[in-house]
Amino acid sequence: MALTLFDSPDAAPNQKLLEVHARLCGEYGCPIAYFHDLEPLDELVSSLLSHRTKNADSSRAFRQLRAKFPTWDEISTAPVQEIEAAIAPATWPEQKAPRLQEILRAIEEERGVLSLDFLAEMSVKAARAWLERLPGVGPKTSAAVLCFSRLRRRALPVDSHHHRVAARLGLIPKSLPVGPSHAVLEAMLPAEWDAQQVYDNHEVLMLHGQRVCNFNAPACRKCVLLDLCPAGHERVGV
Ligand code: SF4
């Protein structure tokens, strides 16, 4: 298979990412509909519960939690065992329940109220820094709160699917962990892109990782990115 402009070591990585984005948007249909319309604090808790948990299970845990404890104050002050029972469908409820209460108490202590609506008034950079001071909150969660919630801000989350596809395509080094890859991949996006375009970029790379470029058996011969992809070339022997 012939090399393309984007295989040249001199090609700017963001040009390759733009081509990847355009092709995957053609495959998956941009703009992608937002899958959540949650308040930012709800999104933070949802994100915490979703860590290493199937979507259906984390959604059930979140619904059970909110059904049993309608206010954040109740969640913050309830016996931890009751929180653990409510979020049992998620993985590691014994770790997530105390962490959730720790986060709520930290927000209330600093802001005096259990809400993250104030983040709308901050720059994305400052809002992410504020969130990442909370216990256990890293770049993926801070980006998820800003991007997926009603705030609809311009922040790029990178999950394991997104990260795997980006590494196989050579957009980031294979040795770069998910956490630091957030800043690297976001810096490659055009500055003029709006929040929807940044969200689309995450979604199409994630969907491609789930549906085509999966962990064990990527379907390289059917992949629309094969001519751009060093890992695909190695796999199909071209
Ligand atoms: S060519 Fe293969 S390794 Fe590369 S992105 Fe496509 S499925 Fe993944």
Image: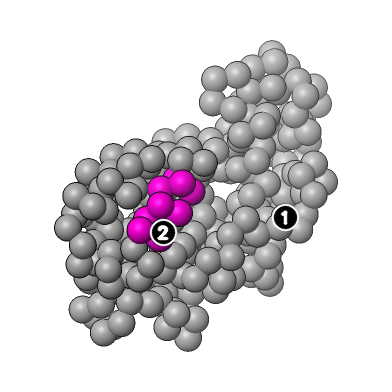
Classify residue 155 as left or right of residue 30. left
Q: Which residue type does callout 1 highlight?
A: Ile
Front-lying residue, 106 or 195: 106
Please tell me the numbered disc located at residue 67: 2
Q: Secondary structure at mark 1?
A: loop
The earlier-in-sequence mark between 1 and 2 is 1
Residue 54: percent from left, percent from top: 48, 38
What residue do we see at 70% from left, 23% from top?
220
Front-lying residue, 1 or 118: 118
Q: Determine if residue 201 is in view.
A: yes
Please tell me the numbered disc located at residue 19: none
In magenta segment, residue 104: no
- The stretch of residues the image draws in magenta is 58-68
Crowding around mark 2 (Cα neighbors within 10 Å: few <14, some 14 to 19, many 20+) is: few
Residue 175: percent from left, percent from top: 42, 36
Single out the residue that lies furthest toward the top.
Answer: 237
Residue 42: percent from left, percent from top: 44, 65
Classify residue 99 as left or right of residue 227. left
Residue 160: percent from left, percent from top: 49, 39
Label 1 – label 2 distance at C-alpha: 29 Å
| Pointer 1 residue | 32
